[in-house]
Amino acid sequence: MVYDPLGRSFPIEWRHVMLVAAGNVRLSEFRTTTEKTSANPFTNERYANQTLAPQVRTHEEFVFKPLLEIILAGGVQRFQIEGGKMLFNYLGARRQKSEPENFTLLVRDLLQFAPHALPNRGAFFLKQEPPQLFSYPSKNAFFEEIVWMLWRKG
């Protein structure tokens, strides 16, 4: 069962899953911080005790996050899941406390139910014992591997 961005669900047969790509992908995030500022008492005594508007600063940070792509046969549909945004409720009693362990279980389940699907390097290494979360230096590198795999399957 898959869900679209509007929350509607629809079933997809496992035989239609063509490619499963997973990995720990380096993504950029923008963080906003707010700092309170006050007037400088040395510049003007009249405004010394007044608070000025807060100063807002935005900066870019690079973080690694688990990313999963599922592509259906013929490239008719593509689904992307960011590990940190998934609830993993379907795991039930198998659900672990850590996100990487739950992500590993999800990828392993996908590959088990769709054994014909092509796994990328990240999915392949999660299937091994012990599982390893393969890292990609950028989202672009992750997507380039997917494009290359689809071209090779051609």
Image (spheres, helix red, strand yellow):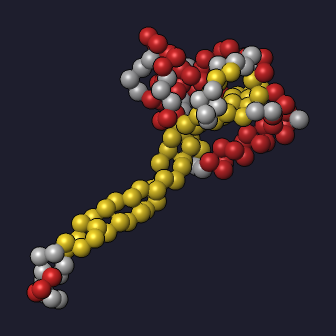
Q: Residue at x 31, y 62 (%)?
A: 34
Where on the picture, by quarter, is residue 43? bottom left
Q: Residue at x 74, y 16 (%)?
A: 13
Where on the picture, by quarter, is residue 127? top right
Query: Residue 14 in the image: x percent, y percent?
Result: 73, 16
Where on the picture, by quarter, is residue 15? top right
Query: Residue 10 in the image: x percent, y percent?
Result: 68, 21
Query: Residue 70 in the image: x percent, y percent?
Result: 69, 30
Residue 128 shows up from this direction: no
Looking at the rendered image, the quarter that the C terminus falls into is top right
Q: Camera-side residue: 144 or 81?
A: 81
Looking at the rendered image, the quarter that the N terminus falls into is top right
Residue 17 shows up from this direction: yes
Which residue reaches farthest bottom? 43
Q: Is residue 140 above or below residue 44?
A: above
Q: Is residue 39 above or below residue 135?
A: below
Q: How many marks?
A: 0
Q: Residue at x 66, y 50 (%)?
A: 140
Q: Camera-side residue: 95 or 37?
A: 37
Residue 50 located left or right of residue 95: left
Residue 126 located left or right of residue 144: left
Which residue reaches farthest right? 154
Query: Residue 92 in the image: x percent, y percent?
Result: 46, 13
Q: Residue at x 75, y 23 (%)?
A: 17
Q: Is residue 135 above or below residue 14?
A: below
Residue 42 located left or right of residue 54: left
